[in-house]
Image (cartoon, rainbow, N blue to C red):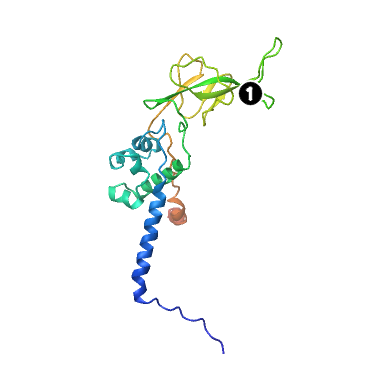
Amino acid sequence: MILGSPRPQALPSSFLPCLHRRLQYVRKLHQQVSASHIPPPTPFVPDSKTFLTLIGRSLTQHAAKIPTWESLFSLTSAQLRELGVEPARSRRYLLWWRDRFRKGIHGIGGDLQNVVDGIAEVRVVEVPKNRSSGSPTATVTTFPRKRKVIVNLPPGITNVELAAEEAKPVSGMKVLGAHTIVGPYVELVKGMNGSVGRIRVKEGIWEERRGHKVDGGERRKAEVRAKRRAEERRTTRG
């Protein structure tokens, strides 16, 4: 005799309220944990409006709904929906960028420390190359080996000598040729031969561009192309 698998037993009705309360508790705990880590603002991203400006996709239109840095990193998706942050893909995009910023991931300029009114100055400087045996020294016939790096200095400082460990290169930029700064959204200063540039807070310089849908996107591509082929066959027969 072959016995079938036992039927799943229904939960007693008295257990359902307890299960519902537990699910609510887990959901609330998850929201508290996700909102507990609020990263500090940075010189380049000092407030919520600047953050919304940088990530683009017209999210600055919601700046009044997210007025503080704490609210920017603590509001849940449901709360953002209640505040009128629409459509849903905008909320997902905001939460995605918020999580990246928590992890220390940022766009161009995010690591700049010397920023005045949303503008930072970068310049090419020469620093000694690192050597395990110590700092290189110059003699009558030899000179210390140097390398060129792009650093962020306070405005107006031109002549500065930095040790190799003090020169923190700006991420996302590089030196092209002898002294030309190359990087996204870098504005070169006239008369400085490309060795000095500025980067300023602008709408969408951190924006992740949405892909262009081809033939209705992945979900509708087969349907759209089948209809197109059928229409072409009808046109050819006619």
Residue 103 image offset from top left, x and y in percent: 48, 42
Where disc 1 sits, the SS reads loop
Residue at position x 52%, y 16% in the image: 160
Q: Residue furthest top?
A: 140
Where does the image place residue 203, in percent across and percent down from the top left? 37, 33
**What quarter of the picture does the N terminus occupy?**
bottom right
Tell me the residue at 44%/51% (across/down): 217
Please state the horizontal and vertical placement of residue 13, each as a whole percent of the image. Answer: 34, 76
Q: Residues within 10 Å of mark 1 (few under 14, many from 20)?
A: some
Relative to residue 94, is residue 140 depicted above or below?
above
Identify the image quadrant of the C terminus.
Answer: bottom left
Q: In which quarter of the image is residue 146?
A: top right
Q: Eyeballing the image, is 216 above or below 106?
A: below
Relative to residue 58, is residue 210 drawn left or right?
A: right
Q: How many labels does the image show?
A: 1
**What residue lies at 33% left-to-right and 53% top-to-bottom?**
78
Q: Position of residue 33 (x, y in %)?
A: 41, 51
Camera-side residue: 109 or 11? 11
* 124 and 93: which is toward the camera: 124
Residue shown at the point (45%, 28%) measured from the top left:
113
Does residue 168 appear left or right of residue 203 in this picture? right
Residue that numbered label 1 is attached to: 129
